[in-house]
Amino acid sequence: MEFSSALELIRKIPDFPKPGILFQDITPVLANSDAFTSVVKEMAKSLNNVDVVAGIEARGFILAAALAGAYEKGFVPFRKSGKLPHHTHGEKYGLEYGDDEIEVHIDGFKSGQKVLIIDDVLATGGTLLAAIALARRCDAIVEKVLVLLEIDFLEGRKRIIEIYPEIEIIALAHV
């Protein structure tokens, strides 16, 4: 399946998780093996110059783990607060519909390791900013972030570039 056809499977859910939000549901892409494979292959084009792939809970680490496994890279999860069993660093962030916190194990990355961080959607940028801060706190080098979809009008890219202009931001599609 062509990548553009895979994107057509993304379902738009109005008023989820609260009124006024148009949720981009990627589960139909994940459920279709041809579409999922096409997405992973497209994401693989961003693997140059990285040592490890990190993914943000929950859909981001589905994509990141698939990519890491298929292309023999390590995988590091960013989880919601209280989900990781070992000592962690945590970072709070704002969403377009509330606040949350993600964590990473304190030894999740090796010092100087080059990281590709993956999430499903770049909206306001809060989640990715938190993940970048956590990776850097572990002394990793965030080379780039990769998202399946970027919601342009929410200007998350702008927020990230203002703080981390050296990090490449890759969006496979824009809405």
Image (spheres, grey):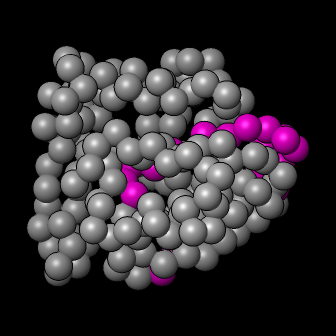
Q: State the image coordinates of residue 146 (x, y, percent, origin top left).
A: 48, 43
The kind of secondary structure the magenta stretch mainly shows is strand
- Residue 103 is a magenta residue: yes
- Split into 4 quadrants, where in the image is the C terminus? bottom left
Name above or below for residue 169 compared with residue 13.
above
Stretch in magenta: 99-122
Question: Which residue shows up at 30% across the image and 61% down it?
Answer: 152
Quarter of the image where one finds residue 111: top right
Is any atom of residue 82 visible in this view?
A: no
Residues 146 and 17: in front is 146
Q: How many marks?
A: 0
Residue 50 lies left or right of residue 35; in this view the side is: right
Can you give x and y, in whole percent of width and height, for residue 165 in the image? 61, 58
Residue 40 visible (yes or no): yes
Left/right of residue 106 with respect to residue 166 in the rendered view = right
Relative height, residue 15 to residue 166 (above, below): below
Say which residue appears at 17% left-offset and 79% top-offset. 20
